[in-house]
Amino acid sequence: MRIVRHDDVDLVDGYVVAIGARWLLLAVLDGAIVLDGHTALRLEDVRRVTRLSNGDMAQQALALREQWPSAPPVARLELDDARGLLTSLERQPVVTVHPENDDPDTCFVGAPAGLSGRALRLLEVTPRGVWSSRPTKHRVDGITRVDIGGRYEQALLSVAGLAPDLT
């Protein structure tokens, strides 16, 4: 499926894995016909869903590469509200959060360090693979997309290692 949202944000191609009351989860299909982690998107942002024209070929190619059917994410994700989703991601070693309504070209990658009030605390990792010394806060209601388990997140994690313990 191709998920079309606002004009300023990326199209997302993939296979719908789960749908909750407020979020949907996709197994992401990249342009090289490879599954690339999972993406959670807010349902309220979805404008149009279309079937990909290469769907049958893509599914056959994925099956030949032993990527089909797609593996579920490591953690069971809560898709009924943003706080539930972010809480269910707390044990992930690294996630990418997108505050697309504030800035569609910005994302933050890091290890979830908990929820406090109306904010997600995220210990960020730089594009060079270096962990920040303190978590930053991101408004829960400003997060419109969350990526987990993709090749970019995996590459950063392999360079940076697991997040340092903050206690």
Image (spheres, rainbow, N blue to C red):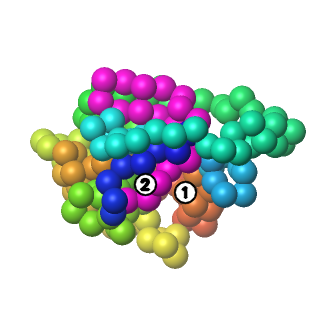
Rendering quarter of residue 22 = top left
Disc 2 crowd, CA 10 A, few/some/many (<14, 14-19, 20+): many
> Does 49 sit above or below residue 11?
above
| Circles 2 and 1: CB atoms closer than 8 Å | yes
Q: Which residue occupies the foreground of this view, 75 or 33?
A: 33
Task: Say left or right for 147 vs 62.
Answer: left
Q: Residue 51: image x %, image y %?
A: 58, 38
State the residue at coordinates (30%, 44%). 45
Magenta residues, start to end = 9-27
Residue 36 visible here: yes
> What is the number of the mark on residue 96?
2
Task: Say left or right for 3 vs 150.
Answer: left
Q: Which residue is mark 1?
A: 153
Q: Residue 137: image x %, image y %?
A: 22, 56
Q: Amino acid at mark 1?
A: Glu
Q: Which residue occupies the foreground of this view, 44 or 88?
A: 44
Q: Secondary structure at mark 1?
A: helix
Quadrant (top left, top right, bottom left, bottom right) of the N terminus: top right
> Does 161 sit above or below residue 45?
below
